[in-house]
Image (cartoon, rainbow, N blue to C red):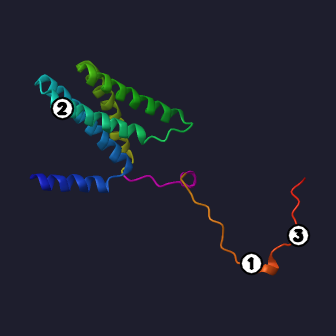
Amino acid sequence: MNHQAREAYIEDQILTATPQKLRLMLIEGAIRFAKRTLLHWENRDNEQALESIIRCRNIVSELLSSIRVDESELTKQVASLYLFVFQHLTEAQLRRDVKLVEESIGILEIERETWRQLCEEMPTAPVPTVEHLAAGPQEIIAPMVAYSDSDLPSGSINLDA
């Protein structure tokens, strides 16, 4: 498969993916770059290792930033998990610590399996509920009503109770 065909295939996969599939793809990308980091360190190619671990951290950062932390205990736990992985990768980068990268890969592999199962059980995008729609940003606009001068109240208004 040539490079252009591969890029077109990946772009098509991204553009047609459900939200849960996109998350799975991000997790898979993070794992791939973390494993590349280990391979580059093994080959003493520190420049490529640095690039790989930075890309892995960027993906984990994106995963973390996409979580809507609300009052739910689950979202707090998932955010804490990604923050832990991000901190591990940052420390691993500074110390070139293989063990920290391997631990991060282990956590991401568990997360990948969770999202893989979710994608199997829920192959289509979830349908937003009224609550989800109401929770999103909304603009409230006053209706355009034309009043003639004679319809407007005259005199003063007393706001004292």
Q: Is residue 120 visible?
A: no
Residue range of the region highlighted in magenta in the rendering? 124-135
Please say whether residue 136 is one of the residues in the magenta stretch. Answer: no
Element at label 1: loop
**At which x and y percent is residue 52?**
21, 34
- The residue at 27%/22% (across/down) is 94
Q: Which of the numbered marks, if any, corresponds to residue 113?
A: none
Q: Residue furthest right?
A: 161
Q: Are marks 2 and 1 in contact (CB under 8 Å)?
A: no
**At which x and y percent is residue 36?**
18, 32
Name the residue carrying label 2. Answer: 36
Q: Nearer the viewer, residue 95 or 1?
A: 95
Above or below residue 2? Residue 109 is above
Element at label 3: loop
Asked which quadrant contains residue 98, the reply is top left
Q: Is residue 92 visible?
A: yes
The amino acid on which the numbered mark 1 sits, given as a three-letter code, is Tyr
Above or below residue 56? Residue 8 is below
Name the residue carrying label 1. Answer: 147
The amino acid on which the numbered mark 2 sits, given as a three-letter code, is Arg
The amino acid on which the numbered mark 3 sits, given as a three-letter code, is Gly
Label 2 vs label 3: CA separation?
77 Å
Badge 1 or badge 3: first in the primary sequence: 1
Name the residue carrying label 3. Answer: 155
Label 2 vs label 1: CA separation?
69 Å
- The residue at 66%/66% (across/down) is 142
